[in-house]
Image (spheres, coloured by chain):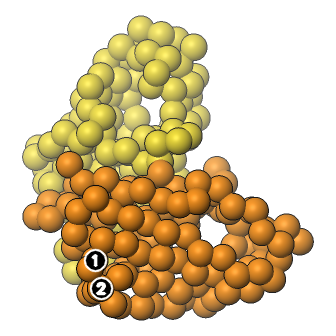
Amino acid sequence: SQELEQSPQSLIVQEGKNLTINCTSSKTLYGLYWYKQKYGEGLIFLMMLQKGGEEKSHEKITAKLDEKKQQSSLHITASQPSHAGIYLCGAPPSGTYKYIFGTGTRLKVLA
Amino acid sequence: DAGITQSPRHKVTETGTPVTLRCHQTENHRYMYWYRQDPGHGLRLIHYSYGVKDTDKGEVSDGYSVSRSKTEDFLLTLESATSSQTSVYFCATFDRGFYEQYFGPGTRLTVT
């Protein structure tokens, strides 16, 4: 079965610093989703990547799907306290709608 | 925002009692999902539905059953709750033509 591994598991950064979160799949990705979860709340969709090499941005958050389509990175530029939360990557295994998710990355931004 | 509600939002129950969690959507989405979220495990799929009365198991379905008699409602039942089922449960919906799953606010379940 397909698995998604995220790194790092947790991250504490000073406000204004850049950071990167990685999501690595054990199999080829046919679409990769990034979600953000504020502590104690539901998940909010950030962006979806489908094509190898594709890159998308949402405000100061940029995500990219590598050419081989087995890894995605999410990069935050000039982090702010509002970026704090849990970031999860998710993907539907080929031919299914049974989504799987990574274990999540907890981000804390110090003001 | 997709109209997804979950009830109850919080519940404390005793080991061995049955528990039913409800997910209600107003978006007429075909697919509905139940996940549980636990520290160190992220989100794990319990069951999902691809239409009324059509359901399938996820990776952690043991001890759980589901039912979907209407498009808008997806019920998750713990037949006999155990302490290992203490978790936060999320419902989500999806339909083709949209990019993402839409998530409900979650239900925090504690089994004592």
Which residue occupies 32% across, 63% down? A25
Q: Which residue is mark 1?
A: A69
Left or right of B71: which side holds B100? right
Q: Position of residue B29 (x, y in %)?
A: 25, 65
Task: Give me the C-alpha separation between circle 2 and circle 1.
Answer: 5 Å
Give neighbour class at mark 2: few <14, some 14-19, many 20+ (Cα, 10 Å).
few
Q: Quadrant of residue A37?
A: bottom right
Q: Which residue is mark 2?
A: A67
Work out whether residue A93 can be spotted. Answer: yes
Secondary structure at badge 2 equals: loop
- Residue at the extreme right of the image, as rendered: A111
Chain identifier, colour orange: A
Which residue occupies 26% across, 80% down? A68
Chain identifier, colour yellow: B
Residue type at numbered disc 2:
Glu
- Residue at the extreme front of the image, as rendered: A68
- Residue at the extreme top of the image, as rendered: B16
Quadrant position of the C terminus of chain A in the picture: bottom right
Work out whether residue B2 can be spotted. Answer: no
